[in-house]
Image (spheres, rainbow, N blue to C red):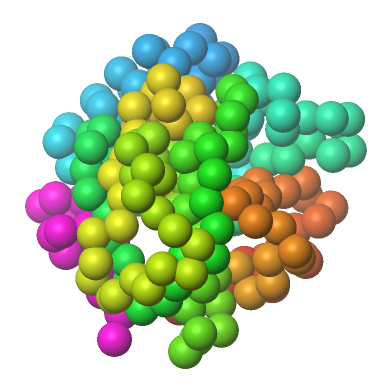
Amino acid sequence: MIHRLFAQPFLEKNSLALDLSVTNTELNTAIYGNTNAFCAYIATKLGGKIGYGGYLENRVIYESHENFATTSADFRNIHLGMDFWSEAGTPVFAPLAGVVHSFQVNEGSGNYGPTIILYHPAENIYSLYGHLASEDLAQLEVGAQISAGQKLCHLGKPDENGGWPPHLHFQLIRDMQGLKGDYPGVCSLRDVDYYAKNCPDPARF
């Protein structure tokens, strides 16, 4: 049985789909290039609700962070997980039973910040939780058992989550490729076929 990620079920009255794709003409560098402006934009859009969306979304917002653009051909702008936007401190619950695979703070502008990865043996899949509160990693141990519905983490503030408006990056991964505590959450257009297979849509799982 899959447990919901947040305390309340997503209904029309408390949630909305948030469009951060390249087709959103409201977005510009003055917004996504400034953390305070981006936070204000997201908060206004949400109006107290939880925002969601972003799987395989083509986004322009990454161009303000150097770690996403090594060369023009490798510019990583295709989002591989689903984002859930809300207030910092919002608790997140484990959707499936599993064990702690790994965790670490992925530092740098635009990065995940505090990150947790679980392995779910029954489904043979991993789940990644990025942009968390730093305190969420303090008591974790690799191999620790996690129950479905157990409180796992909280949304972090911009000064600890990589410089983003508070949100959860949630991603499913079939093959970790030997990585621990980190896995690409955004890929280039030329690599999207591989990553779309390795990172299935969480909404259809």
Which x, y percent locates residue 104?
54, 44
Near-viewer residue (145 or 201): 145
Which x, y percent locates residue 194?
78, 66
Which x, y percent locates residue 86?
26, 39
Q: Which residues are magenta?
A: 1-20
The quadrant in which residue 77 appears is top right
Residue drawn at the location 26% of the way across and 33% of the way down: 88
Near-viewer residue (141 or 1): 141
Q: Quadrant of the N terminus?
A: bottom left
Q: Quadrant of the C terminus?
A: bottom left
On screen, residue 169 versus residue 145, left or right, reads right
Q: Is residue 172 visible?
A: no
Q: Is residue 92 visible?
A: yes
Residue drawn at the location 59% of the way across and 29% of the way down: 107
The quadrant in which residue 124 appears is bottom right
Position of residue 91 relative to residue 107, above or below, is below
Residue drawn at the location 38% of the way across and 13% of the way down: 36
Which x, y percent locates residue 120?
48, 78
Majority secondary structure of magenta residues = loop
Residue pushed farthest left?
A: 13
Residue drawn at the location 49% of the way across and 46% of the way down: 115
Q: Residue 89 colored magenta?
A: no
